[in-house]
Amino acid sequence: MSMPALFKGRLSIPVIGSPLFIISVPDLVIAQCKAGVVGAFPALNARPPELLDEWLARITEELAAYDRAHPERPSAPFAVNQIVHRSNNRLEHDLALCEKYKVPMIITSLGAREDLNQAVHRWGGIVFHDVINQTFAHKAIDKGADGLILVAAGAGGHAGTVSPFAFVAETRAWFDGPIALSGAIANGRAIRAARVLGADFAYIGSAFIATEEANAVEAYKAMITNSGADDIVYSNLFTGVHGNYLKPSIVAAGLDPNDLPTSDPSKMSFGTDTSGERARPKAWKEIWGSGQGIGAIDKVVPAAELIARFKKEYDEAIDPPL
Ligand SMILES: Cc1cc2nc3c(=O)[nH]c(=O)nc-3n(C[C@H](O)[C@H](O)[C@H](O)COP(=O)(O)O)c2cc1C
């Protein structure tokens, strides 16, 4: 296990609040960091692109002010997620702003790039890359990523299909750097379990949708609090890549979740496609993403309250005697 120096003394629990398209906004990121977990957001959430400058200024300033007032327990570092895919024509612009603010941590998805990793290292940042299998994991480290995010079965968004037990064990066999494990982690006991498996961090997304600071409509938050693993559907229809979605939102869009067609992967879209094509309901806006862990989430609370609950459960979680 290896926790980079960046995080030492700055986390209340070993958690990264994962980047969520549309949902992760500065209010949520700042609340997460102040409560001692890494807050992250996709650069693409700042629209128009110029808004990213404002967001980074606000996050940097508010966290610095918090740190001055709480030198004994400074805020957790924050992270910006970059979608490294050919459809993302903002990447250079967004990366230049991350350099301007010396963003401490970059999370890359859907593509590993050596030049990007080197650029982040030049300003003193670290890069974690998210992967769904061993091939991509090796590629990410070969290209200079510092850490891996193992997106296991049951995760929200573009999830993998590998069991977390197999994924962490196989990765730890060759990689002793930092690992974040993701997929249906939504309580403190599961965070502890991720560490017992050999991960350094739990990487948690869906649970944070049901927080007051999350930028999601009330009906989406209510669907998270009212649903469980049986309500999650794995399909590639909506973006071209397989992901987990809330069944009731698919029904509300007029589709049969038990009889979904499969999609053409060449038509991948991550919110950067402005062609106006409307052949299928819009992923994220109409079809709501979620992982399988949300049975543990039953009310909408401030992010700090959810994190306090995680911490209590994490501290209390023990392996019962035989
Ligand atoms: C609604 C939603 C949007 C997401 N958007 C992104 C994104 O923009 N970039 C990204 O790297 N991951 C994205 N993810 C994946 C999460 O960062 C993370 O891997 C996942 O939420 C972890 O699983 P969990 O939801 O079961 O906790 C998204 C997930 C959800 C549920």
Image (cartoon, grey):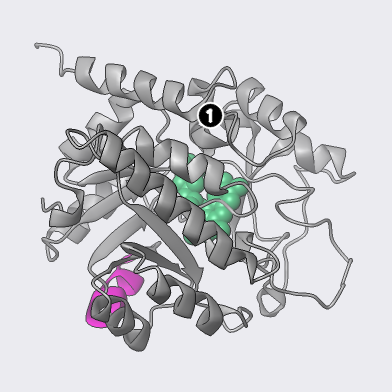
| Furthest-bottom residue in this view | 115
Q: Is residue 150 left or right of residue 2?
A: right
Query: Where is 115 relative to 182, above or below?
Result: below
Q: Position of residue 106 (x, y in %)?
A: 37, 65
* Residue 312 picture quarter: top left
Q: Would residue 22 be seen by someone viewing this image from the given angle?
A: yes
Q: Which residues are magenta?
A: 133-143
As shown in the figure, which amino acid type bears the numbered disc 1?
A: Ile
* Residue 68 picture quarter: top left
Q: Position of residue 153 (x, y in %)?
A: 44, 47
Tell me if residue 242 is in the magenta stretch: no
- For the C terminus, which image quadrant? top left
Q: Would residue 4 be seen by someone viewing this image from the given angle?
A: no
Mark 1: secondary structure: helix
- Circle 1: is it few (<14), some (14-19), or many (20+) Cα within 10 Å? many
Q: Is residue 188 left or right of residue 56?
A: left
Q: Position of residue 140 (x, y in %)?
A: 30, 75
Q: Main secondary structure of the magenta part?
A: helix
Q: Which residue is mark 1?
A: 294
Q: Is residue 102 left or right of residue 199?
A: right
